Image (cartoon, grey):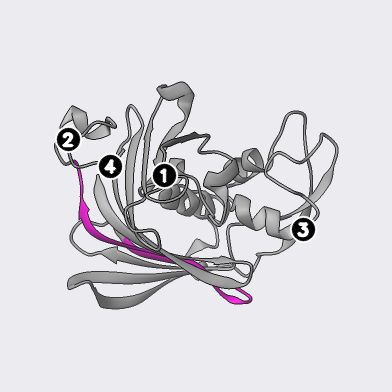
Amino acid sequence: MTYTITKHERIDGKLKKQVSFTKMQKNPYRVYLRQSFPNDGMEVLYVQNENNDKALINPNGFPWINLKLDPRDGIMRNDQHHTIFQSGFDHVVAILEFLCDKYQHEVEKMVMYNGEVDQQGRRSFEISFSNPYFEIIDYTISDQETIEDVATKYKLSAYMILECNPKIKDYEDVNPGQVIKIPNDYSPKLNLVIDAEKFIPLKMEVIDEKGVYEQYVYSEVVINPKFDPAEFAAGFESYGF
């Protein structure tokens, strides 16, 4: 699929905005991203099982050279709630499926249909998922488990787990037997806008007790485009690597 995503994520108490055009292929997993805000022209290319599983970065600025970075850690996780592995809609769908299964006997009371809305000129459905059971709980780290592992297992925000544990430095800074704080669910409230024709998310908004935690707006979405194989190579003619 291809799409433009406008995201707002709360970092250190402030919502930070990014706008990027994305191309992604699920199998094998390949992602190309070109940011237009705040760093216009910055590019990321990741191809599964290539470049030692590192992402190629064109920073379009200092240090003026291409970089190869681990997309799971380090610089690529700075000021980001998610990794490039959570591109597309699968991450959103997985969270919703997990919550609906967990609260299957009460889900009808937790989900509210708010009617039709216009989203980017498209007829859409607005839906809210309110979770009265959301809370912060204790969790004991098991052998070889990282914060990212915990987040993946229980469909949580790894970044939110870090926020709940200010003494933890990064996603691997935990030890077996260590007790940490984690949210028991992804968030207290989720707002979704679904395209009435294609039934794909056009907007996802995560709300906590402080307000908007993260918001993602998808535009110019194309499902199953025909990619030229060269579009996931650094030498593709329109790329700046």
Using the rendered image of the protein, determine whether residue 207 is visible from the camera's viewpoint.
no
Label 3 – label 1 distance at C-alpha: 33 Å
Left or right position of 236 against 87: left
**Label 3 close to label 1 by CB (< 8 Å):** no
- First reached walking from the N terminus: tag 3 or tag 1: 1
The question of residue 217 being in magenta is answered with yes
Dot 2 or dot 3, earlier in sequence: 3
> Which amino acid is tagged 3?
Pro
Percent of width and height locating residue 166: 77, 58
* Magenta range: 202-224
Q: Give the CA separation, mark 3 to mark 4.
A: 38 Å
Is residue 213 or residue 67 the one in the foreground? 67
The crowding category of the residue bearing disc 4, from other C-alpha atoms within 10 Å (few below 14, some 14 to 19, many at least 20), is: some
How dense is the environment of label 1, judged by Cα within 10 Å: few (below 14), some, or many (20 and up)?
few
> Is disc 3 surrounded by few (<14), some (14 to 19) or many (20+) residues within 10 Å?
few
Q: Quadrant of the C terminus?
A: top left
Disc 3 marks which residue? 166
The residues tagged by marks 4 and 1 sit, at their Cα atoms, a distance apart of 11 Å
Is mark 1 in CB contact (under 8 Å) with mark 2?
no
Identify the secondary structure beneath mark 3: loop
> Which residue position holds label 2?
227
